[in-house]
């Protein structure tokens, strides 16, 4: 089993890329991979209770619900959350420090910074 | 069971490209793949999002599709995310023959079986 880490650093609405990163993360779990998704910088804005469909954007809510079922672990970097004053998180999100994020990156066999 | 070491059979190198042909990534990825194939390695390329535009046939010897076609003749395996393509109005008849019109499942398989994996995004 290969350890795969996807990193999303961008906020949800400038482009469709962040939601594509979530879709790809879900897809990566379909083979023999141990998949994690790390939200850093503005990527943590994806954890807000957004109503993306109201502006015709794809919603990531489904992915948040399904990640635990397909054993995808979702991480958010704590400094990015604090800087953006995001205190309430969806279930299943694990907050980690920058040092822990570095360790995640160094122990992954494949890192995909998705933009 | 595969008893060959990656060095003996060549590395399996996977590529993901999500940017359109105007991005520098195209040139970089194509040159890397060219060098890897020439050195006896295996290469697989998965296209999603704007990376899909590489497969669109344009009548020019220097078009991205023409470069891709040459690499495929040299052994490159190319597949794509059908959802990304159809969302851009690109269908199988618009693209090069020999490309796998698949799903994110194929990307998952490429990642799982690659000795090395490189992602090229914006």
Image: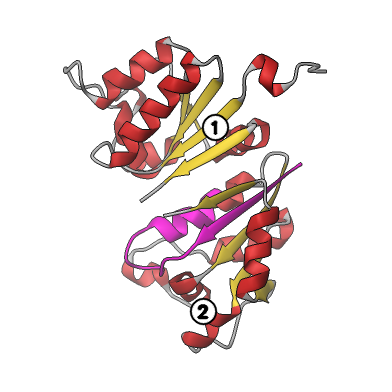
Query: Which chain does tag 2 point to?
Result: A
Same chain check for tags 2 and 1? no
**Labelled pair 2, 1 in contact (Cβ < 8 Å):** no
Residue A80: mark:
2
Q: Which mark is residue B14?
A: 1
Viewer-side residue, A44 vs A30:
A44
Classify A11 as above or below B53: below
Q: Dot 2: what SS?
A: helix
- Where's residue B38, x and y in %? 47, 14
Q: Which chain is home to disc 1?
A: B
- The residues tagged by marks 2 and 1 sit, at their Cα atoms, a distance apart of 31 Å
**Residue density around tag 2, few if under 14, some if 14–19, many if 20 or more, within 10 Å:** many
Rendered view: B46 above or below B11: below
Q: Residue at x 74, y 20 (%)?
A: B5
Q: Which residues are magenta?
A: A1-24
Work out whether residue B86 can be spotted: no
């Amino acid at each position: 089993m290969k350890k795969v880490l996807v990193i999303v650093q961008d906020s949800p609405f400038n482009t469709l890329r962040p939601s594509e990163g979530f879709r790809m993360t879900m897809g990566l779990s379909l083979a023999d991979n141990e998949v994690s998704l790390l939200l850093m910088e503005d990527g943590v804005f994806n954890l807000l209770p957004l109503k993306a469909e109201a502006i015709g954007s794809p919603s990531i809510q489904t992915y948040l619900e399904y990640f635990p079922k397909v054993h995808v672990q979702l991480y958010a970097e704590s400094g990015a959350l604090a800087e953006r004053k995001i205190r309430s998180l969806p279930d299943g999100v694990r907050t980690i420090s920058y040092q822990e994020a570095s360790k995640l990156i160094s122990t992954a066999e494949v890192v995909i910074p998705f933009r | 069971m595969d008893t060959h070491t990656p060095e003996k059979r060549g590395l399996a190198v996977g590529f993901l490209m999500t940017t359109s042909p105007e991005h520098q990534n195209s040139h970089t990825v194509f040159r890397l793949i060219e060098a890897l194939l020439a050195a006896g390695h295996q290469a697989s390329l998965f296209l999603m999002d704007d990376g899909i535009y590489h497969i669109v046939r344009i009548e020019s010897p220097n078009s991205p599709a023409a470069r891709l076609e040459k690499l495929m003749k040299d052994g490159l395996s190319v597949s794509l995310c059908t959802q990304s393509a159809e969302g851009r109005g690109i269908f199988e008849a618009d693209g090069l023959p020999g490309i796998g019109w698949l799903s994110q499942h194929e990307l998952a398989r490429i990642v799982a079986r690659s000795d090395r994996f490189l992602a090229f995004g914006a």
